[in-house]
Amino acid sequence: MKKIMDEALLRSYIQKHRLQSYMDMELLPAAELFVFQKDEYLVHAGEVSDYLYFMIRGEAIFFSYSTAEKNTCVNYLKGVCMIGEASSLWDRPPFLSVRAMTECTCVALNLSLYREQLLSDLTFLRYIGYVMGIRLNNDARVVTSLLEPMNVRLARYILEHSPEDIFSARLTTSAAILNTSYRHLLRTLREFCEAGILQKTRRGYLLLDRNALIRILEDS
C-alpha cells in the first residue's frame, strides 16, 4: 500500500466520482489517497480495518478460506465501490478478506478519526443501507452458483462479460471469481470452442453462438 500525497489529484477523484454526494461531512479535508498493488490486501479477515475505502479504480475480490485452505470468492468488485462498510465501520472484525486483483486506487477515511462522525451522518448511512442491500443479493447469487457445474457458471459469466461478442476478461481473475482452477477454466473454454460456441482470437474469445450459452443456462 502506498499513500499518494497529492491534494489536487485527490480533489479531482472526489469530484469526478461524486464521492461527496455520499455523505454530509466534508470529505476532502478528511480523505487520504492510497494505491494497492496487485495481490495486496485491502482488508484481512478477523482484523478491523483502519480505513473505509472508496475504490475508484481497479478490481478486487472478497474471499474466505475453506477447510482445505482454498480461497472461495464471495464477491467481485470493479470500479467505484465501497470497501469496509459491513464490519470495520462498526468496529467489528470482518469474516472475509479483500485482495486486489489489479492495481487499485482508493480514497480512504481513517476510521479511528471519523467513525463516530460517519455513524451520525444520515446521508452516509442511507447510502450504506443501499450498498449493503445490493451486496447481499450479489453474495447470495455467488453462493448459489457454487452449486452449479462449471460449464453453467462459465456460460453465465461469458454472457455478462462479452461486450460486442468478445470475451476478453483476464483468465486468472476469471478463475478466481468462478471459484475454479486456471486449468479447469482453460479446459471448459476449450470445450466451448470445440462445440462451436467460442473461437479463440488475438483479442480474446469471439462469441459465435450466444443462444448456445443461453440454452446451457436454461437446461441447468
Image (tube, grey):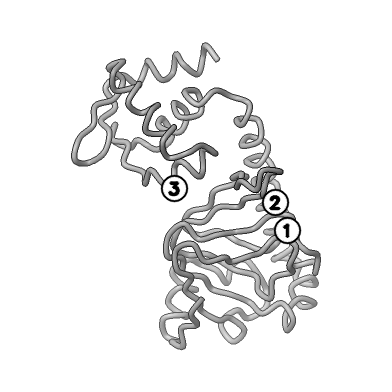
- Residue in the foreground of this view, choosing between 36 and 134: 36
**Left or right: 193 with respect to 179?**
left
Q: Quadrant of the C terminus?
A: top right
Name which residue lies at 70% across and 62% down. Answer: 85
Residue 142 spot, x, y in % from top left: 61, 37
- Where residue 122 sits, quadrant-wise, is bottom right
Q: Which mark is residue 173?
A: 3
Q: Badge 2 is on which residue?
A: 132
In the depicted structure, whether residue 169 falls above or below residue 184 = below
Q: Is residue 7 left or right of residue 144?
A: left
User: What residue type is disc 2 on?
Assistant: Met
Amino acid beneath label 3:
Thr
* Residue 86 marker: 1
Mark 3 and mark 1: span between their CA atoms? 24 Å
Report the front residue among 91 and 164.
Answer: 91
Instruction: Tell me if mark 2 has few (under 14), some (14-19) or many (20+) residues whose alpha carbon lies within 10 angstroms of its own.
Output: some
Q: Residue at x 45, y 73 (%)?
A: 13
Q: CA distance from mark 2 to mark 1?
A: 7 Å
Q: Quadrant of residue 145?
A: top right
In this view, 70 is above or below 159: below
Amino acid, disc 1: Ala
Against 99, residue 75 (above or below) is above
> Considering depth in this image, is 72 or 84 the residue closer to the camera?
72
Mark 3 or 1, closer to the camera = 3
Label 1: how many residues lie within 10 Å, few (<14), some (14-19) or many (20+)?
some
